[in-house]
Amino acid sequence: MTPGAALAAECARYTAMGWMRGTSGNLSVVVDRDPLRLAVTVSGRDKGELTADDVVLVDAEGRTDDPVRVPSAEAGLHGRIAAVTGAGAVVHVHALAPVVAAEHWPDGVELRDLEMLKGFGRRAHDDTVLIPVVLNDQDMTVLGDAFEAGYRADVPALIVARHGVYVWGADLHQARHRLECLEWLLRFKVETRRDPR
């Protein structure tokens, strides 16, 4: 399957889950490492209707030479994440649970003692996972710097406050599995939160 076809299929899946509403969200796969190049979903299209042609090749900073297709505005952050982590795929969706969790725990969302952590690549018990939260910004360099400042190799995710979540993996399948498990974990955290009043 071509990168474009794979990205379109994943977008359709996330749209069906309500995580890529309207034209929101973006996905990428690494197509070359030296120099780093990624195939990224195009901007401004309904993600549930993408075709294999609705991707654009970008460099590590999210720039493209394509005169027609416009990459997502967040392509530069995809490049930064792929460069720092060595990931083969980065997914960014607007699932609600991560954004709500960041409202309650703006310094990072702590998860522990949940079986679903195993699907996120961590132990179910005796392991504390802190999902970093960064403030939203329209400048991808600022967001990239915030990502790097809080990056830990054993936590393949980043929540951008009042925006969405980024998850990465060796390929689109691993990134998807991690995202699906993380969304469940964050939904559990939010729905079982004790009201401090």
Image: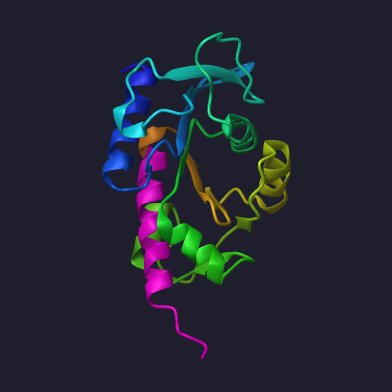
Q: How far across and down, in percent of the image, does residue 150 sit?
A: 68, 53
Magenta stretch contains residue 189: yes
Q: Nearer the viewer, residue 63 or 148?
A: 63
Give the colour scheme of this rendering: rainbow
Q: Nearer the viewer, residue 32 or 94?
A: 94
The image quarter containing residue 6 is top left
Q: Residue furthest bottom?
A: 197
The image quarter containing residue 143 is top right
Asked if residue 194 is positioned above or below residue 162 in the image, the reply reads: below
Q: Residue at horizontal 33%, vertical 41%?
A: 14
Residue 32 visible in the current orientation: no
Magenta segment, principal secondary structure?
helix
| Magenta residue span | 174-197
**Left or right of 24: which side holds 18?**
left
The image quarter containing residue 45 is top left
**Left or right of 35: which side holds 51?**
left
Asked if residue 85 is positioned above or below residue 129 in the image, the reply reads: above
Total residue callouts: 0
Q: Residue at horizontal 67%, vertical 26%?
A: 61
Q: How far across and down, in percent of the image, does residue 152 sit?
A: 63, 51
Magenta stretch contains residue 149: no
Position of the N terminus by quadrant: top left
Q: How far across and down, in percent of the image, does residue 109 sit?
A: 54, 66
Residue 11 visible in the current orientation: yes
Q: Residue at horizontal 64%, vertical 20%?
A: 63
**Left or right of 59: which side holds 142?**
right
Q: Residue at horizontal 42%, vertical 63%?
A: 186
